[in-house]
Image (cartoon, rainbow, N blue to C red):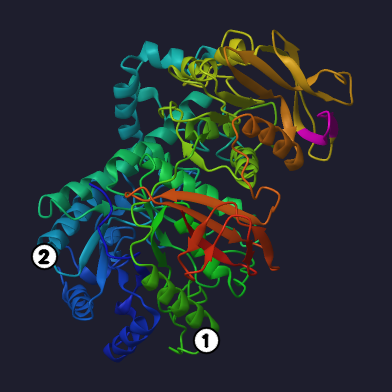
């Protein structure tokens, strides 16, 4: 099952009419019509409203919302409302409240406040989902099901401890296998009974916080267990819905590069992927793009939904900048360029109270239609209506893959040494950014993905190498492709045990190198790296490389390892394997990645315009669409590299003609 079929990009967002009287509902729908809003996400935090007591259900408000939506010719993404407990459930069953990392059982409050191993929570949540599905399946306004909301967080209670032990039995089979996986002969931790295993919390394996663990194996497994425990909650609700509604697509809103949960384990169970995009507004545009491409990669390149973004500002940060004029439109078109088939906001009308009262909304507290934000949202609604279905179902024809691995993320950052300053998403983003700014379309995929469609595979800080990945990477190189790996890659196996071989483990023969030593320095220590025609700097980690068939491409310029390789290239078959042994600065990463892409003709024609982002989608009918997005506050003057028609303006441009882009401007070119 895939995303719902619609005649145009669904446009709208989170709507909470239960917070407002009926006369406001009338005004909301008038404004929705003015703004071109056709899709409402409803009921996300409605549990205490729809089930005010253990044996009492009241769907009056949800009924009215759906009926009104249908009357206004709008569609609804209906949430089950199970992300935050109602007070009565926490009082009746205290065990539904989470126990935190410090071992404290929480009392009622906050949100995402449920224990995923609690039978009381699971039973109540699935019962509510079943009642909703039984009542609303087949409703003319129903477009999709939205289970829970932004799953996340961990619990360390006795129920989770028991569930964890059961999960370990299933994963490892025997205590001997578990002891070997966790290397428990270290510090006399060998287990002789399953009941001896505690959850890895501040009271057991950790000190100075959750990322300082004595035994990486148990902490790595607890991350995996938490992912599966919350996934089990999702699947239980989905099963309850499917008993009454076998056809309507089901999703939940993910959060992109969200460390606690491995979304690749969730991907097979989502009918379509969706995510909430809230990048820091001072971050480069490739941060949001990475989240889009990661979400698209969850379903093998199928289009996804942008389930939430702010129309103006967030409220959860210390400082919450406002989106400048034009930035909302640009961010929305960026999502569409990377594969979004829906563009939704949080939120449609601002809440009067609580912690999100200052969060941006299409409609402000006063309900005005003459604000800048409303005007920009309405103009975008008209633009999307005019576009119709021209981009729906289109896919990205990428020839470059970036391997993204939650296991490596966790293992790298919970490891003692070489440096706690190395952050997995920062290194991954550096290589992704280099490829995107060079004009390459990029698929962000798990290490288990089929690599045959790709000419280039980027594998930065892939700390764990599992299964047959090394063999598949070698196959890609021998047939003419290029693989790039970096420092701290291929250090450990799936259990975070160091390989008893030369570094970089199973990738050493492919890379043609050996690493015996590595130096880690404080963040303010910067070393020069000579890349030939380019000079770069490096920091944090400096691996000392001994070539074993590879040739140096860049060399260190300081310390006792000055003159030794910092970047190498190894020719294998008709392809190449590159290794970057240190954390290069962004210009250094850009230089290396562009050399790799250039070998395959993957540097785009607009790569010289750093502020101009390009992305390609191909429709089901085979039409090729080129998106151009100007992220600068100044105009960009490009030259057309193909004959094309801009779907947003109708303007035709022939090859060689000027192709101007306004500040924060967008063009959607249908190539001839």
| Mark before the other along the chain sequence, 1 or 2 | 2
Given residues 530 and 353, the one toward you in this image is 530
Q: Tell me which corner region of the image, top left, top right, bottom left or bottom right, holds residue 137.
A: bottom left
Q: Residues within 10 Å of mark 1 (few under 14, many from 20)?
A: few
- Residue 330 appears in the rendering: yes
Q: Tell me which corner region of the image, top left, top right, bottom left or bottom right, holds residue 396.
A: top left
> Marks 1/2: CA distance?
38 Å
Given residues 509 and 661, the one toward you in this image is 661
Q: Compared with residue 543, is residue 124 higher up or lower down, i.e. above or below?
A: below
Identify the disc placed on residue 371: 1
Q: Which residue is mark 2?
A: 135
Q: Compared with residue 171, is residue 137 higher up or lower down, i.e. above or below?
A: below
Instruction: Identify the residue at horizontal 65%, vertical 12% (top origin).
Output: 512
The range drawn in magenta is 527-539
Q: Tell me which corner region of the image, top left, top right, bottom left or bottom right, holds residue 157.
A: top left
Element at badge 2?
helix
Instruction: Identify the residue at horizontal 62%, vertical 66% (top origin).
Output: 661
Given residues 435 and 636, the one toward you in this image is 636
Q: Would you say residue 531 sits in the magenta stretch?
A: yes
Element at badge 1?
loop
Q: Would you say residue 605 sits in the magenta stretch?
A: no
- Residue 420 appears in the rendering: no
Q: Compared with residue 184, is residue 131 higher up or lower down, i.e. above or below?
A: below
Given residues 315 and 8, the one toward you in this image is 8
- Say left or right for 65 vs 553: left
Identify the disc placed on residue 419: none
Residue 106 place in picture, x, y as percent: 41, 54
């Amino acid at each position: 099952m895939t995303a719902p079929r619609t005649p145009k990009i669904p446009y709208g967002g989170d709507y909470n009419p239960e917070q407002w009287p009926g006369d406001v509902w009338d005004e909301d729908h008038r404004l929705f019509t003015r703004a071109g809003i056709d899709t409402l996400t409803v009921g996300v935090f409605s549990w205490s409203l729809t089930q005010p007591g253990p044996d009492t259900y009241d769907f009056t408000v949800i009924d009215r919302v759906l009926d009104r939506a249908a009357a206004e010719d709008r569609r609804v993404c209906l949430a089950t409302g199970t992300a935050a407990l109602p007070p009565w459930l926490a009082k009746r069953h205290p065990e539904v409240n989470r126990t935190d990392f410090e071992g404290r059982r929480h009392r009622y409050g906050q949100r995402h406040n449920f224990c995923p191993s609690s039978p009381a929570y699971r039973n109540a949540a699935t019962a509510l989902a079943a009642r909703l599905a039984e009542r609303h399946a087949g409703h003319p306004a129903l477009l999709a099901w939205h289970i829970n909301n932004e799953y996340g967080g961990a619990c360390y209670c006795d129920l989770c401890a028991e569930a964890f032990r059961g999960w370990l039995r299933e994963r490892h089979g025997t205590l001997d296998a578990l002891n070997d996986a966790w290397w428990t002969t270290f510090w006399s931790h060998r287990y002789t009974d399953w009941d001896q295993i505690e959850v890895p919390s501040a009271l057991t394996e950790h000190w100075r916080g959750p990322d300082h663990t004595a035994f990486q194996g148990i902490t790595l497994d607890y991350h995996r267990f938490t992912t599966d425990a919350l996934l089990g909650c999702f699947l239980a609700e989905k099963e309850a819905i499917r008993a009454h509604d076998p056809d309507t697509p089901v999703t939940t809103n993910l959060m992109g590069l969200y460390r606690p949960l491995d979304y690749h384990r969730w991907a097979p169970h989502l009918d379509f992927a969706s995510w909430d995009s809230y990048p820091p507004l001072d971050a480069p545009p490739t941060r949001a793009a990475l989240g889009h491409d990661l979400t698209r990669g969850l379903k093998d390149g199928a289009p996804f939904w942008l389930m939430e973004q702010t129309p103006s500002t967030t409220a959860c940060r210390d400082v919450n900048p406002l989106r400048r004029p034009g930035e909302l439109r640009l961010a929305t078109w960026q999502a569409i360029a990377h594969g979004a088939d829906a563009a939704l906001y949080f939120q449609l009308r601002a809440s009067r109270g609580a912690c999100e009262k200052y969060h941006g909304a299409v409609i402000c507290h006063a309900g005005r239609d003459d604000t800048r934000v409303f005007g920009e949202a309405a103009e975008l609604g008209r633009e999307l209506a005019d576009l119709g279905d021209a981009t729906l179902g289109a896919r990205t024809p990428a020839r470059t893959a970036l391997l993204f691995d939650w296991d490596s993320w966790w293992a790298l950052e919970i490891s003692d040494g070489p440096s706690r300053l190395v952050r997995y998403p920062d290194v991954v983003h550096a290589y992704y950014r280099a490829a995107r700014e060079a004009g390459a379309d990029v698929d962000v995929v798990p290490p288990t993905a089929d690599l045959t469609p790709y000419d280039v595979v980027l594998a930065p800080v892939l700390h764990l190498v599992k299964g047959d990945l090394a063999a598949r990477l070698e196959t890609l190189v021998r047939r003419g492709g290029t693989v790039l790996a970096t420092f701290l890659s291929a250090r450990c196996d799936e259990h975070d045990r160091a390989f008893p071989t030369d570094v970089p483990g199973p990738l050493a023969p492919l890379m043609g190198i050996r690493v015996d030593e590595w130096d880690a320095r404080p963040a303010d220590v910067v070393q020069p790296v000579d890349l030939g025609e380019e000079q770069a700097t490096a920091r944090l980690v400096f691996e000392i490389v001994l070539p074993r068939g590879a040739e140096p491409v860049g060399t260190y310029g300081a310390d006792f390892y000055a003159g030794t390789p910092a970047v190498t290239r190894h020719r294998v078959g008709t392809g190449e394997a590159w290794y970057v042994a240190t954390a290069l600065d962004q210009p250094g990463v850009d230089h290396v990645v562009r050399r790799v892409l250039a070998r395959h003709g993957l540097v785009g024609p607009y790569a010289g315009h750093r502020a101009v982002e390009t992305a390609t989608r191909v429709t089901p009918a085979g039409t090729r669409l080129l998106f151009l997005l100007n992220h600068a506050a100044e105009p960009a003057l490009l030259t057309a590299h193909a004959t094309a028609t801009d779907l947003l303006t109708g303007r035709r441009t022939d090859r060689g003609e000027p192709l101007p882009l306004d500040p924060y401007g967008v063009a959607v070119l249908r190539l001839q």
